[in-house]
Image (cartoon, rainbow, N blue to C red):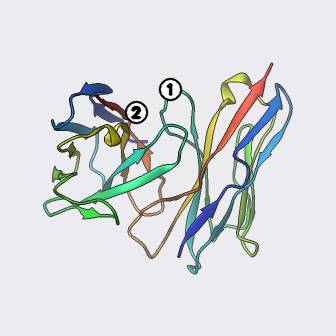
Amino acid sequence: AQTVTQSQPEMSVQEAETVTLSCTYDTSESNYYLFWYKQPPSRQMILVIRQEAYKQQNATENRFSVNFQKAAKSFSLKISDSQLGDTAMYFCAFYGSGNTGKLIFGQGTTLQVKP
Amino acid sequence: SAVISQKPSRDICQRGTSLTIQCQVDSQVTMMFWYRQQPGQSLTLIATANQGSEATYESGFVIDKFPISRPNLTFSTLTVSNMSPEDSSIYLCSVLRDRGEPQHFGDGTRLSIL
């Protein structure tokens, strides 16, 4: 079975500091697509960053970057220079190239950025 | 990314009634999905909306309770039938333009059943 595990239900960070959210997954597929989504209290699901499993280079989007370790099936998200607007629930998710595009979600990590 | 309009954004309904949620995309997409999310929880996939045919439901969800339509490549509806307080939740639609791309989500419908 394909699964995603986020082991940190809640985290907090001071404004301007760096925080890393962890994510591990399990799949037997060799090619798949990984994503981090952000859901602020407004409930809108916002794509933060994406990573194709066949690419070794870690994806980066401004202050957001990932540490993708394919062998370890790990996909952590690093947020640099944290801002108050980063306060949200973060979901790790993936879908395989062999399935029907259905996303498998982790349980989510609630991040609180403190002033 | 696709622009997705989901309506209504919220509603309060009486038990035993039904509500239809609409999801409109500004361009043709390959796949459309419907999710349910309890407050503070992760998303649970209800079904994949298939264009021109019956939706594909996940375990625990049935067509009689959650009928879904997708008449074309830009529009889908989800009906929550014979509602009970247990159906109070957030319902989200999402779209996938093409394989390898991320899913993009509507703003969600917050549904409360009295």
Residue B48 seen in the current view:
yes
Marks 2/1 same chain: no
What is the three-letter code of the residue carrying label 1? Answer: Ser
Residue at image position (23%, 37%) is: B21
The residue under label 2 is: B107
Residue A19, numbered label: none
- Left or right: where does residue A26 sit relative to residue B26? right
The residue under label 1 is: A42
- Left or right: where does residue B95 sit relative to residue A79? left
Element assignment for label 2: loop
Which image quadrant: the C terminus of chain B? top left
Percent x, y of residue B45 = 39, 56
Instruction: Name the one closer to the observer, B33 or B3.
Output: B33
Residue B30 seen in the current view:
no
Vertical side of A99 occupied by A6: above or below = above
Residue at image position (13%, 60%) is: B52
Identify the subunit bearing mark 1: A
Which image quadrant: the N terminus of chain B? top left
Label 2 and label 1: CA atoms lie apart by 8 Å
Element assignment for label 1: loop
What is the three-letter code of the residue carrying label 2? Answer: Asp
Residue at image position (58%, 81%) is: A28
- Left or right: where does residue A87 sit relative to residue B15? right
Percent x, y of residue A35 = 58, 54
Dot 2 and dot 1 residues touching (CB under 8 Å):
yes
Q: Quadrant of residue B15?
A: top left
